[in-house]
Amino acid sequence: KVGNSVLFYIFALMNFFLLCIGLALAGGGIFLWTVTRTANVFSFSLIGVGVFIGLIAICSFCLKNSSIRLTIYIIVLLLLTGLMITTLVAFEVERDRVLDWASDSIKDEEGSEAWEEARRHIEDNIDISRYIIIAATTVTILASAFGIFYRCSISYREDERYNAIQNK
């Protein structure tokens, strides 16, 4: 055995949740793109972050045997957590500015019914995106924690095997 199997399965479950959240973020970006009928930085950033989180989660399933790759993965997760916390703070502090910035990209005439509907969709999607990022941050922190625990169990097992070989 390489490490504690229970820790690995919990780690894998957290990464499955992370994959689902990445897909939700990418889907939210695509939805926003179709509602506003224009390509803007906000929708592309949601798509990009969602795809990145999804790829990271997919890569995590190959980390059962390598403590070095697991360490790199944990560092990437911690950097991603910092980025998501920064994004959450920016959403809270500059919410109106982000909403105005996203609304500027709507191609319909300002004040029209289509413009108001698209702005309402953007506002709802910003709130949904914020909640998804909160969930992603929580799951990323949990995945990092269980990754660290699993890495420690790998190190413990390797030390245990080394000591058994030395004692023979």
Image (cartoon, rainbow, N blue to C red):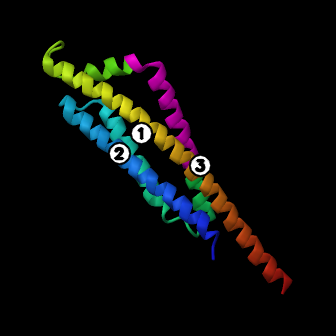
What percent of the width, then of the height, locates residue 30?
A: 26, 40
As rendered, which of 167 and 68 lies closer to the eye?
A: 167
Task: State which mark lies toward you, 1 or 3.
Answer: 1
Region in magenta: 75-96
Secondary structure of residue under mark 2: helix
- Side of 160 where 47 appears, left or right: left
Q: Which residue is mark 2?
A: 24
Q: Which class describes the residues within 10 Å of circle 1: few (<14), some (14-19), or many (20+)?
A: some
* Quarter of the view holding residue 126: top left
Which badge, 2 or 1, comes first in the chain's sequence? Answer: 2
Q: Quick check: 109 above or below 82?
A: above
Q: Which residue is painted at 47% across and 31% down in the image? A: 87
Horizontal and vertical percent position of residue 106:
21, 23
Kindly identify which numbered label has been placed on residue 44: none
Q: Compare residues 35 and 79 and report the one nearer the observer.
A: 35
In the image, residue 77 lies in the stretch drawn in magenta? yes
Q: Earlier in the sequence, mark 2 or mark 3?
A: 2
Name which residue type carries label 3: Ile
**What residue did someone put label 3 on?**
75
Give residue 16's quadrant in the image.
bottom left
Residue that lies at the very extreme toward the top in this rendered image: 111
Asked if 58 appears above or below 79 in the picture, the reply is below
Instruction: From the image, tell me which residue sits under label 1.
Output: 132
- Look at the numbered discs 2 and 1 and tell me whether their residues touch, using CB distance below 8 Å: yes
On-image quarter of the C terminus: bottom right
The answer to whether any part of residue 66 appears in the image is: no
Does the magenta run of residues contain 101? Answer: no
Q: Amino acid at mark 1?
A: Ile
Kindly report the distance in space between the C-alpha atoms of the residues bearing marks 2 and 1. Answer: 8 Å
Question: Counting other residues with Cα less than 10 Å from the Cα at mark 2, is it few (<14), some (14-19), or many (20 or more)?
Answer: many
Q: Secondary structure at mark 3?
A: helix
